[in-house]
């Protein structure tokens, strides 16, 4: 019985108001019962009779809605629910007969028909209010669940987006320091691109999705930084702005294209004599980034800021998934272009 008390529901203020409203609606029935009993058992006993006659089903409502139903649903035990409810109704019927006899109200002899009638009478009084309160609880629980899921999703997205910001800051600052000493004009261009890149991150840090046009511009700034850092070891010549067309009005998570490019550079070895080929294709409802596989000589520790994080972000935003294809010599990732979220 420990679970029985552990999973009981609390009474909300709105529940009290619902019960009070139902009692107000039932006032004519109170009056009718009072008039019917007044001339037979007197004023005092009639007051007690009316109070008990309507308060007894209220106890059943309380027990059913706030104890029995939550526990039975939690344990998924229909037999348990039926047995306890039947025992409770029998106890209430016996209690009613005892109280009515004490008040001087004539009651029929105990038999199957009288017990059945008293149980039916109690159910008829308790069922409407029980249904109202239980449905209200279900609606509130569903609302709480949806709110918790939304907050969880927002927290996970925020964490994943925060992982993007500082990932390549240190190396880029090192490159900037070298350029300042060697070529101030190149350093100025590098700094402008670097500033545009972080301006994008700051601008869209609280957004779940951005226009592909904005993301593509961000990715081009990132590519420029890569080229300044590694020279021509990575060949991005296949990137064509005019191949995107109307797809620029679609949406992707902030940093999605950049994350794929970063993943390629991180895990594949570039070479000045034989640059690593990277291709981008904008097709129907997707953006595909494909690269030849050329693993680095030294293993690179995997983190959650790459492909896995991007997969997680798409799962949180939509029912569309990343499409990953790997062959012996190439690796390709297709990210869905979202119409809206």
Image (cartoon, rainbow, N blue to C red):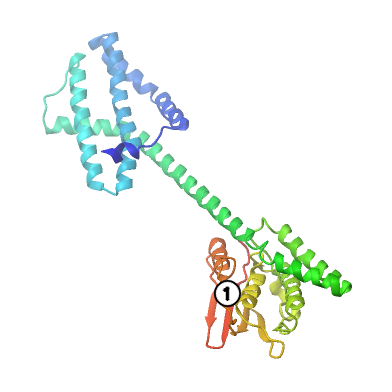
Q: Nearer the viewer, residue 272 or 338?
A: 272
Residue at image point 73% right, 79% down: 230
Q: Quarter of the image containing the N terminus?
A: top left
Q: Position of residue 254 (x, y in %)?
A: 66, 64
Q: Which residue is mark 1?
A: 300
Does 317 sit left or right of 105 as displayed?
A: right
Q: Quarter of the image containing the C terminus?
A: bottom right
Whether residue 284 is visible to the viewer of this picture, yes or no, is no
Q: Position of residue 269 (x, y in %)?
A: 63, 82
Whether residue 92 is visible to the viewer of this picture, yes or no, is yes
Residue at image point 28% right, 38% down: 2
Does 268 sit left or right of 71 as displayed?
A: right
**Dot 1: what SS?**
loop
Does 145 sit left or right of 117 as displayed?
A: right
Q: Quadrant of residue 128?
A: top left
Residue at the extreme right of the image, as rendered:
185
Residue at image point 19% right, 32% down: 90
Does 3 sit left or right of 219 as displayed?
A: left
Q: Nearer the viewer, residue 26 or 97?
A: 97
């Amino acid at each position: 019985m420990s679970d029985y008390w552990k999973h009981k529901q609390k009474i909300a203020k709105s529940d009290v108001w619902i019960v009070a409203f139902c009692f107000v609606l039932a006032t004519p029935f109170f009056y009718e019962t009072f008039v019917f009993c007044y001339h037979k058992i007197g004023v005092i006993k009639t007051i007690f009779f009316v109070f008990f006659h309507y308060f007894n089903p209220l106890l059943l409502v309380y027990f059913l809605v706030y104890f029995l139903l939550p526990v039975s649903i939690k344990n998924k035990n229909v037999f348990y629910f039926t047995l306890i409810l039947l025992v409770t109704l029998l106890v209430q019927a016996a209690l009613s007969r005892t109280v009515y006899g004490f008040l001087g109200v004539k009651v029929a002899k105990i038999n199957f028909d009288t017990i059945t009638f008293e149980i039916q009478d109690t159910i008829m009084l308790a069922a409407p209010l029980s249904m109202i309160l239980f449905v209200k609880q279900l609606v509130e629980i569903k609302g709480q669940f949806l709110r918790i899921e939304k907050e969880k999703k927002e927290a996970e997205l925020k964490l994943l987006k925060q992982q993007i910001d500082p990932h390549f800051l240190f190396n880029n600052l090192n490159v900037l320091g070298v350029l300042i000493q060697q070529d101030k004009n190149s350093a100025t261009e590098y700094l402008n691109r670097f500033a545009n890149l972080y301006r994008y991150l700051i601008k869209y840090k609280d957004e779940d999705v951005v226009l592909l046009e904005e993301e593509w511009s961000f990715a081009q700034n990132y590519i420029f930084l890569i080229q300044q850092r590694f020279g021509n070891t990575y060949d991005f010549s296949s990137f064509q702005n005019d191949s995107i067309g109307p797809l620029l009005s679609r949406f992707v998570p902030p940093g999605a294209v950049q994350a794929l490019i970063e993943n390629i550079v991180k895990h594949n070895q570039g070479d000045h004599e034989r640059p690593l080929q990277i291709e981008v294709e904008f097709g129907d409802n997707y953006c595909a980034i494909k690269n030849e596989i050329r693993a680095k000589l030294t293993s690179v520790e995997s983190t959650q800021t790459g492909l896995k994080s991007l997969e997680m972000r798409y799962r949180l935003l939509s029912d569309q998934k990343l499409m990953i294809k790997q062959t012996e010599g190439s690796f390709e990732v297709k990210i869905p272009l979202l119409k809206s979220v």
